[in-house]
Amino acid sequence: MNFVVDALPLYLNGARYTLLITVGGCAVAFVIAMAVGILGSTRSALLRAAASVYVEVFRGVAALVLMFWLFYAMPLVTGYRLEPVFAAILALGLNVGAYGAENVRGAIKAVPQAQYEATVALNLSWAQRMRLVVLPQAWAQMLPTFGNLIIELMKGSAVVSLIAVSDITFVAQQLRTFTGETLLAFAAALVTYFVIAQIFVALMRLAERSANRRLGRIPDRTRRRQAAGAGVAAAKGGAA
């Protein structure tokens, strides 16, 4: 119990860095995913090729190696050293953004062809088609996969301890070294990561419900509840 009480401020500080890197990495990944995913769904062969090159390169590079390159190798080339936290955010964002781009491209392609034909019939510009018709429908399909990618990015942030960022894993390793409490140190880290993951899961579920509600898609549970209510009302009406 004394270990938990004494170490709690350290884990909270580590959680702060983990959240900062996760949110920052997600912001970078989201911008990249939307831009590259949309480019990958255009009719231009050149733009599709550029998007494909980005996706294949950054999906094929380990996030840890990319982070090491940005933090240790890039200064040898440019003479400029990135801050550890920024290097971690950039590496994870570039890596996860490649997976997110494929999610965006697939969601856009999944929008029914009839919707595209309707936008052409209405003489909408490409930008109007994407903003008013395609992306609102694709967004609801993107969210479940985006939720998984956020959790993967958060868990992947554990490697940032290797460039001396004081995240949760770094705190656990330091406590293990100085106290010898291996079991408690990493058990506390495990619980902290789990709690953070559940927060992100809850937020993404809320976002999914909101997106589906805007599109008029009623979740199965709500539909069953409404059907049950209608059945009860009908039964009461028949009895009367």
Image (tube, rainbow, N blue to C red):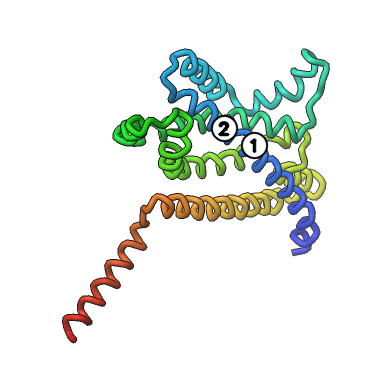
**Residue 238 pos. (x, y %):** 16, 81
Q: If you read the primary sequence from the N terminus, does the residue marked by circle 2 or circle 1 appear first?
A: 1
Percent across and percent down for residue 97 are 56, 31
Closer to the camera in the image, 135 or 193:
135
196 up-or-down from 136: above or below? below
**Residue visible at 49% across and 28% down?**
37
Label 2–label 1 contact, CB within 8 A: yes
Q: Residues within 10 Å of mark 1 (few under 14, many from 20)?
A: many
Q: Secondary structure at mark 1?
A: helix
Question: Residue under circle 1?
Answer: 25
Residue 229 vs residue 181, the one in the foreground: 229
Residue at the (78%, 55%) spot, across then down: 7
Q: Residue at x 54, y 28 (%)?
A: 35
**Does 194 appear above or below 100?**
below
Q: How many marks?
A: 2
Residue 231 location in percent, x, y?
A: 23, 72
Q: Which residue is mark 2?
A: 96
Which quarter of the picture shows residue 61? Answer: top right
SS state under label 2: helix
The residue positioned 80% from the left and 50% from the top of the image is 179
User: Which amino acid type is marked by label 1?
Assistant: Gly
When asked about the image quadrant of residue 96, the answer is top right
